[in-house]
Image (cartoon, rainbow, N blue to C red):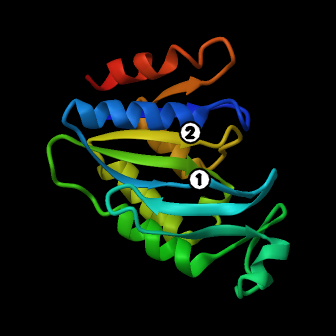
Amino acid sequence: MLIVAITGRPGIGKSTIFSKVAEALKAHGYTLYGFYCPEVREGARRIGFRIVDINTGKAGWLALSIDKVTQLGYNPHGKRIGRYVVIEEEALQIGINALRVSTKENSVLGIDEIGPMELSMPKLREEITRSLVEARRALLVVHRNLNDKVILDIFRKRNAKVYTVTELNRDSLPNMILREFI
């Protein structure tokens, strides 16, 4: 039972490392399941985040900037996280389906990221928690200020290895993390 968590400040390269390790795991015969949440930009401005099922590629909105919510026809009165509104219906549909437990021996749970937006939805938080308990292996990106007591307790019980990304180590981390799994 292995949990590897990647953390660090915004923009430091956590998602890039996650992607590199995920691709390398696939090349070594592992199957990944879970989701990732890439940012979406219009020009230089971030307008929101998608949630994408790693297996199927099915995607929906996780959150949109306040001005984009109404422009794209969503409810502007949803949960707010900073300057974003969580698009709960789409996020739950994609996120919960993506976290179905894989029964394959060589499976790895992948989540990028476990942060305030993902945890703001009780049903998704519950599925993330269940998945962390049941997964044989997990590769995660976690918000640098993660303070969810249940998830942190799972990390402690399963002896999670937490890597903090810095400018000095980000080039060597993908191989270091890959060695944890292989």
Q: Is residue 2 left or right of residue 20?
A: left
Q: Is residue 121 left or right of residue 133?
A: right
Q: Front-most of 150 and 137?
A: 137
What residue sits 52% from the left and 47% below the top? Answer: 112
Dot 2: what SS?
A: helix
Quadrant of the image occupied by residue 129: bottom left
Q: Front-most of 16 and 114?
A: 16
Q: How far across and down, in percent of the image, does residue 138 sit? A: 37, 40
- State the quadrant of the N terminus: top left
Q: How far across and down, in percent of the image, does residue 77 sit? A: 79, 84
Q: Earlier in the sequence, mark 1 or mark 2?
A: 2
Q: How far across and down, in percent of the image, does residue 48 sit? A: 71, 63
Q: Is residue 4 left or right of residue 105?
A: right
Amino acid at the residue labelled 1: Pro
What residue sits 60% from the left and 77% below the top? Answer: 88
Dot 1: what SS?
A: loop
Q: Count residues near mark 2 (Cα–Cα under 10 Å), then give few for <14, some for 14-19, many for 20+.
A: many
Amino acid at the residue labelled 2: Ser
What residue sits 37% from the left and 61% below the top? Answer: 99
Marks 1/2: CA distance?
A: 8 Å
Q: Which residue, given by chain and number where applicable, does mark 1 sit on?
A: 38
Q: Which residue, given by chain and number where applicable, does mark 2 sit on?
A: 15
- State the quadrant of the C terminus: top left
Residue 10 visible in the picture: yes
7 relative to 148, above or below: above
What residue sits 15% from the left and 49% below the top? Answer: 104
177 relative to 2, above or below: above
Q: How far across and down, in percent of the image, does residue 149 sit? A: 59, 48
Q: Is residue 160 left or right of residue 107?
A: right
Quadrant of the image occupied by residue 122: bottom right
Q: Count residues near mark 1 (Cα–Cα under 10 Å), then give few for <14, some for 14-19, many for 20+.
A: some
> Disc 1 vs disc 2: Cβ atoms closer than 8 Å?
yes
